């Protein structure tokens, strides 16, 4: 295994994110995969990922492994990516999501184009808050 990131720094990152995103699901910070619950640990071994697993979702929790993360920037990305893909934008942003999606729509031409194309195909209606439903399609 590589050296990874400092355990305390990873815990601090999760605490900062939790302060800003109160809907954040449980995030468990571990030094290495050998500390994970048995079923998750076995899966990581099966996948041949013991030396480089960064994070994993298991039984409703997100696990971050300090040993597998190359730096704190990567740790932030892994945390955000897991949140967006495994728990959905609504779970992360709660009632702030419609305003956030409107801001993205209004300030990003590529998103505006993609959202309009999805609207034409009937993927979602006029409610731009439902853009989060189309997010994986952008």
Image (tube, rainbow, N blue to C red):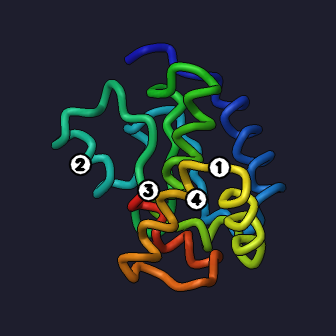
Number of on-image labels: 4
Q: Please, what secondary structure does the residue beneath circle 3 have?
A: loop
Residues at circles 3 and 2 in contact by the CB criterion of under 8 Å: no
Q: Which label's residue is closer to the chain start, 1 or 3?
A: 1
Query: CA gap, disc 3 to disc 2?
Result: 34 Å
- Mark 1 vs mark 2, foreground winner is 1
Rendered residue at 58%/47% (across/down): 80
Q: Is residue 54 left or right of residue 6?
A: left
Q: Which label's residue is closer to the chain start, 1 or 2?
A: 2
Residues at circles 2 and 4 in contact by the CB criterion of under 8 Å: no
Q: Is residue 137 left or right of residue 12?
A: left
Point out which mark residue 78 bears.
Answer: none
Residues at circles 1 and 4 in contact by the CB criterion of under 8 Å: yes
Q: Please, what secondary structure does the residue beneath circle 2 have?
A: helix
Query: CA gap, disc 1 to disc 4?
Result: 6 Å
Name the residue beneath numbered marker 2.
Answer: 42
Task: Report which quarter residue 121 is drawn in.
Answer: bottom left
Q: Quadrant of the C terminus?
A: bottom left
Q: Please, what secondary structure does the residue beneath circle 1 have?
A: loop
Point out which mark residue 138 bears.
Answer: 3
Q: Please, what secondary structure does the residue beneath circle 4 have?
A: helix
Rendered residue at 28%/57% (across/down): 39
User: In the rendering, at what x and y percent does residue 15 appear?
Assistant: 77, 48
Name the residue beneath numbered marker 4.
Answer: 112
Query: CA gap, disc 1 to disc 2?
Result: 42 Å
Query: CA gap, disc 4 to disc 3?
Result: 10 Å
Q: Which label's residue is closer to the chain start, 4 or 3?
A: 4
- Mark 3 vs mark 2, foreground winner is 3
* Mark 4 neighbour density, 10 Å: few (under 14) some (14–19) many (20 or more): some
Query: CA gap, disc 2 to disc 4?
Result: 43 Å
Q: Nearer the viewer, residue 38 or 1?
A: 1
């Amino acid at each position: 295994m590589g050296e990874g990131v400092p355990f305390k720094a990873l815990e601090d990152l999760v605490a900062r994110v939790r302060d800003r995103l109160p809907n954040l699901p449980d995030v468990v910070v571990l030094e290495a995969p050998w500390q994970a619950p048995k079923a998750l640990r076995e899966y990581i071994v099966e996948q041949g990922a013991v030396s480089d697993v960064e994070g994993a979702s298991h039984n409703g929790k997100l696990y971050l492994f300090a040993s597998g993360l190359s730096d704190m920037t990567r740790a932030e990305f892994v945390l955000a990516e897991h949140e967006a893909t495994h728990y959905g934008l609504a779970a992360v942003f709660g009632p702030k999501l419609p305003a956030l999606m409107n801001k993205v729509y209004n300030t990003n031409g590529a998103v505006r184009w993609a959202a309009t194309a999805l609207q034409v195909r009937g993927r979602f209606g006029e409610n731009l808050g439902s853009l989060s439903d189309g997010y994986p399609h952008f």
